[in-house]
Amino acid sequence: MSDQGPIVTDNHLEAARQWFARLSAACAAVDYEAGRRIFADDVASFGTKADIVVGLEPLQSNQWEGIWPNIADFVVDLDSVRGGGDGDSAWGIATWTSTGFSENGDSFDRPGRATIALERRSSNSAPGGEWLAVHTHFSLNPGTPPRTYGQGGARA
């Protein structure tokens, strides 16, 4: 994945849209470093696999590493993004799709939705502030199988 600079727009909805686009690309490419660049170190999250986690390291190890390599075709529907904000705080919601894999390797549709809270924080690369996720919540649509095993299914 090509290196992109920080998200620095003054438009709150556009910040959410750019954030979701970057997360979509990072997850699809299983690019943890690209994903980490759009999160605050003190992020508080929960998701399709992880219970509440605080910190970027636990988020990656308890959520991303158990899901990203075990799905395919992850994409956030950028047309679905809704959001807003005020000052240095922004929020966004969106729907997403992916392909999951059953224990025997059969594929299934794995749709969901996400909520993000962003905060504009100063950094070396963006002294005026860059948008970073301080909270995320990813969940599967009701009725979607909760577990995905990867394209090869469960391994012995």
Image (cartoon, rainbow, N blue to C red):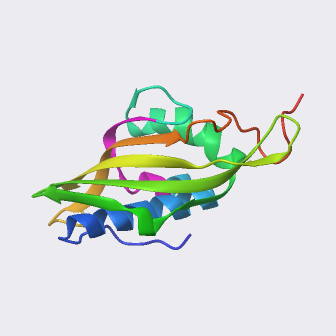
Determine whether, in the image, residue 9 is placed left or right of residue 145: left
Q: Nearer the viewer, residue 9 or 41?
A: 9
Residue 93 spot, x, y in % from top left? 36, 53
Instruction: Report if residue 12 is visible in the image.
Output: yes
Residue 137 spot, x, y in % from top left? 41, 40
Q: How many marks?
A: 0
Quarter of the image that includes the N terminus: bottom right
- The quarter holding residue 61 reads top right
At a point 20% along the width and 70% down the height, the residue shown is: 11
Q: Nearer the viewer, residue 144 or 152?
A: 144
Magenta residues span: 34-46
At a point 27% along the width and 59% down the height, the residue shown is: 83
Determine whether, in the image, residue 134 is placed left or right of residue 71: left
Query: Does residue 37 show up magenta in the picture?
Result: yes
Residue 117 spot, x, y in % from top left? 28, 47
Query: Does residue 95 show up magenta in the picture?
Result: no
- The quarter holding residue 27 reads bottom right
Majority SS type along the magenta span: strand
Q: Nearer the viewer, residue 113 or 58?
A: 113
Q: Which residue lies most toward the front here?
A: 143
Determine whether, in the image, residue 20 is placed left or right of residue 10: right
Q: Nearer the viewer, residue 133 or 20?
A: 20
At a point 85% along the width and 45% down the height, the residue shown is: 106
On screen, residue 18 above or below 89: below
Instruction: Report if residue 122 is visible in the image.
Output: no
Residue 31 spot, x, y in % from top left? 57, 57
- The quarter holding residue 46 reads top left
Determine whether, in the image, residue 66 is placed left or right of residue 88: right
At a point 42% along the width and 72% down the height, the residue shown is: 4
On screen, residue 123 above or below 78: above
